[in-house]
Image: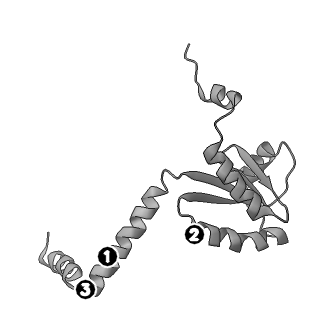
Amino acid sequence: MSANKTAYYQERVEDPERAGDLQDESLTLQASLKNLHPETTIVLFVSSTCPHCQKILPKITEFQKKHPEVFIETRYVDESDVSTNMLEAVEKGVREVPAALVNGRFLVKKDTNFMFRLTYAISLSKTMPPLEEEEEACHFKLS
């Protein structure tokens, strides 16, 4: 390691403010690593032109700040054919946004109580055992 790099690392550790910043960076990294294996995964389907979606997005952002154990992937159906196709497959041809797929099991569609129904679906996905059909779908048969 060069002398400049060594001095830089020593300064970061010895300076109390920088040590605090380093600790914050470390905690942020730990939180993001935890999200690699999140407890709950939500695929949120929205449209940039949908007024209901625009109302929901700030609530989703606030929810995610309060619940870092939940990973939310936002897909804009009006910007990607892949996202549109995913939504059509999940909703069996009907495209309504906003819609959220919780842990690949529960679909929450647009409604006045969207956030309530979303949190309810999250709690169900944590407590309800998989259905027999879901368990069978998870097993691969080798021939």
Q: Residue at x 57, y 70 (%)?
A: 65
Tell me if mark 1 has few (under 14), some (14-19) or many (20+) residues whose alpha carbon lies within 10 angstroms of its own. some
Between disc 3 and disc 2, the foreground one is 2
Work out whether residue 88 or residue 113 is closer to the camera in this orientation and state it: 113
* Residue 47 in the image, given as x and y percentages of width and height: 78, 64
Q: Which residue is mark 1?
A: 22
User: Relative to residue 33, is residue 85 depicted above or below?
Assistant: above
Cβ–Cβ under 8 Å for marks 1 and 2:
no
- Residue 16 is labelled as 3
Residue found at the far right of this picture:
94
Picture quarter containing residue 113? Answer: bottom right
Name the N-terminal-most of marks 3 and 1. Answer: 3
* Residue 9 in the image, given as x and y percentages of width and height: 20, 76
Q: Which residue is mark 2?
A: 66
Tag 1 secondary structure: helix
Q: Residue at x 55, y 17 (%)?
A: 142
Q: Amino acid at mark 1?
A: Leu
Name the N-terminal-most of marks 3 and 2. Answer: 3
Q: Can residue 50 be seen at all in this image of the molecule?
A: no
Identify the colour scheme used: one colour
Q: Is residue 77 left or right of residue 65?
A: right
Q: CA distance from mark 1 to mark 2?
A: 23 Å
User: Relative to residue 13, is residue 43 depicted above or below?
Assistant: above
Residue found at the far front of this picture:
127
Q: Amino acid at mark 2?
A: Lys
Q: Is residue 93 left or right of residue 46?
A: right
Q: CA distance from mark 3 to mark 1?
A: 10 Å
